[in-house]
Amino acid sequence: MAWNIFRRLIGPSSIFQNRLSRNTISVNRITRSLSTVNSNEIEHFSTFKNDWWDENGPFYDLHLYAPIRIQFVRDGLANAGIQMQDPALPLKGIKIVDVGCGGGILAERLARIGAQVTGIDASAELINVAKEHAKLDPGISERVNYIQTTVEDFSQKEGESYDAVVASEVLEHVEEPQLFLKECVKIMKPGGSIFITTQNQTLPTWLVLIVAGEYIFRRIPRGTHEWSKFIAPHEVQRILDNYGCKTRLMHGMKLNPLTKQWSWSSCTAIFYGLHAIKQTKTGV
């Protein structure tokens, strides 16, 4: 009985099958993949289109998570040598694509500090939500653009044209993470940055996010996460390294339940962020 519950929570693949499949991904498999999009994931998130910007709703924690993600991108670009001349708009002129932008929580905040942001998502419903919400702030209307598309289609049209790619809380929801990261790298200019935030595939992650978050306290909509799709940081680093991106920084993140604020942590057991820089020649 307990085993059946565990299998439902982590998804159809066992721990051992999942680890084996991640370690044996072949070039042929990548070539055969037509899309990184998981239609079930798109349908799941699209059902919350009316709740996306309710800061006390189902995505309460995602809103709390936004400030540290913005800091992660801003500090990472500064450490990569980007000159920030305007304190009020430190990312002025920086071209960023927010892959899997959803309803625009992160994209809008990046635009507010000056970035020229393109948000892409496979969900037409969520792209419409993002467009409508952006209209509420005329100050960012010229700095944010939303497109309903997949990362593989977008990379074909916009190869090596962006200073940075942000893939925040999306890697664990795509159909083929290796292909997804490959397409993200194609979008970046040589010397550009990729910023990833996601969850590690550990027992604490299963207990905190799925058991506690979705089933006990119900802070997260049930069915949002599948443990078998979480990915370890060293695996992300390995994939990016194969595609010519050198990891500049990797660290954990933790939430203080009393102050409701996120901070950096040396522990990557649950949440982590990774910043990598695309080298001049990648072979992608």
Image (tube, grey):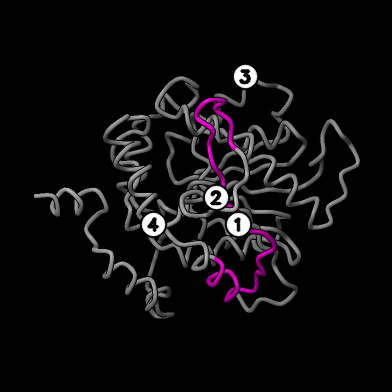
**Residue 179 sits above or below residue 75 on the image:** below
Provide the residue designation for mark 3: 136
Q: Give the CA separation, mark 1 to mark 2.
A: 6 Å
The span from disc 3 to disc 2 (Cα, nearest Å) is 27 Å
Q: Earlier in the sequence, mark 3 or mark 1?
A: 3
Q: CA distance from mark 3 to mark 4?
A: 40 Å
Question: Compared to 23, does 171 lie above or below?
Answer: above
The residue carrying mark 1 is: 274
Q: Amino acid at mark 1?
A: Leu
Q: Position of residue 29 (x, y in %)?
A: 37, 75
Nearer to us: label 3 or label 2: 2
The front one of 112 and 31 is 112
Q: CA distance from mark 2 to mark 4?
A: 16 Å
Amino acid of disc 3: Leu
Q: Secondary structure at mark 4?
A: loop
- SS of the residue at dot 2? strand
Boundaries of the magenta span: 237-262
